[in-house]
Image (cartoon, grey):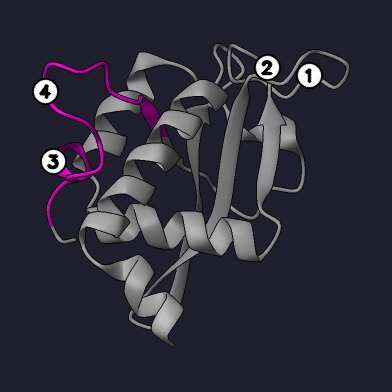
Amino acid sequence: MDAPFSKAPFRGQEKEERDRWYYRQLQGKPRDPNKLVDADHGLRHDDYLQPAENLKTRFVIGQLRNALAHGGVIYLNGKGLYQPGQEARMLAFITEEWRDEKPIPYTVLGVIEADFSSFLRRWARWLGEQGINQSALAA
């Protein structure tokens, strides 16, 4: 789990098409979904791809868990912009990060819905291979 997210065993094989994740830190507490991205482009921008790939896998999973547990999910259009009334194509997981018991800027992880579905299937398969499902059932 300390390996880069790009090397996580549930991200798919190198020859497979891989899910694409986007990451950026936000300044201050985001009170307006339009502040998730720069005015010039949406969250689905190549500038945010490499930072997501370099994150530790443990960090990404923790961010997903925190955003889902605390209602930090926003639906974005295909460009990664918050546009009410447009079809949602992307999920943005927003959470406050803590280091050394101090909050640092909020972060946002973005993923296209189809990529998130693919990621969840691979992750569930990987969990099953690790025996996690049997452990959970026995508990």
4 or 2: mark nearer the eye: 4
Q: Position of residue 63 (x, y in %)?
A: 45, 57
Look at 81% across and 13% down and name the residue there. 86
For label 4, the residue is: 14
Q: Does the stretch in magenta take in 9?
A: yes
- Mark 4 or mark 2, earlier in chain: 4
Q: Amino acid at mark 3?
A: Lys
Q: Quadrant of residue 82?
A: top right
Q: Does the stretch in magenta take in 15?
A: yes
> Residues in magenta?
3-22
Callout 2 environment at 10 Å: few (<14), some (14 to 19), or many (20+)? Answer: many
Q: Amino acid at mark 2?
A: Asn
4 or 3: mark nearer the eye: 4
The answer to whether 109 appears left or right of 113 in the picture is left
For label 3, the residue is: 7
Which quarter of the image is occupied by the C terminus? bottom left
- Mark 1 or mark 2, earlier in chain: 2
Determine contact: label 1, label 2, CB under 8 Å.
yes
Which quarter of the image is occupied by the N terminus? bottom left
Q: Amino acid at mark 1?
A: Gln
For label 1, the residue is: 83
Visible residue check, residue 43 = no
Query: How much space separates mark 4 and mark 2, taking CA atoms?
Result: 28 Å
Look at 34% across and 72% down and name the residue there. 134
Q: Amino acid at mark 4?
A: Glu
Visible residue check, residue 50 = yes
Look at 18% across and 37% down and name the residue there. 6
Q: Is residue 81 above or below residue 116?
A: above
Query: How much space separates mark 1 and mark 3, taking CA atoms?
Result: 33 Å
Q: Position of residue 130 (x, y in %)?
A: 21, 63
